[in-house]
Image: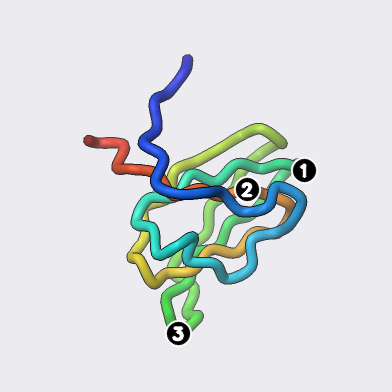
Amino acid sequence: MSQTFIVKGSHTSAAATLSATTVGNAQFVRVTATAGANTITVADADSNTLGTAYIHTAGDSIIIEKAPTDKLTSSGNAVAAAVGSPRS
């Protein structure tokens, strides 16, 4: 099943891990694993972990809702892009 996304900026590098990025202060971020399983960690501006999500395999993706100053980190290679609300 295909999905429609409202793209709100450029994406991060696909050949790297996410490292405490706000993804341009985005509220909704689509994260896609590019190299196998990944744990995505969401932390607040003070680096306190708010939660984690697991992406099973390369090509799998999730949309994370976060505060603009919250940061994303991945355990493996992933690409992230700011998107519009999936409810809009």
What residue is drawn where x is 66% and y is 39%?
A: 56
Q: 10 Å neighbourhood of mark 2: few (<14), some, or many (≥20)?
A: many
Query: Viewed as shown, does residue 38 lie left or right of 45?
Result: right
Q: CA distance from mark 3 to mark 2?
A: 23 Å
Residue that carries the numbered disc 2 in the rendered image: 79
Q: Disc 3 or disc 2, which is closer to the eye?
A: 2
Q: Residue furthest top?
A: 1
Q: CA distance from mark 1 to mark 3?
A: 28 Å
Residue 39: x, y in percent? Answer: 63, 54
Q: 10 Å neighbourhood of mark 3: few (<14), some, or many (≥20)?
A: few
* Secondary structure of the residue carrying numbered label 3: loop
Q: Amino acid at mark 3?
A: Asp
If you read the primary sequence from the N terminus, does the residue marked by circle 2 or circle 1 appear first?
A: 1
What residue is drawn where x is 29% and y is 42%?
A: 85
Residue that carries the numbered disc 3 in the rendered image: 46
If you read the primary sequence from the N terminus, does the residue marked by circle 3 or circle 2 appear first?
A: 3
Say above or below: 39 vs 42. Answer: above
Query: Viewed as shown, does residue 87 lie left or right of 46?
Result: left
Q: 10 Å neighbourhood of mark 1: few (<14), some, or many (≥20)?
A: some
Residue that carries the numbered disc 1 in the rendered image: 35
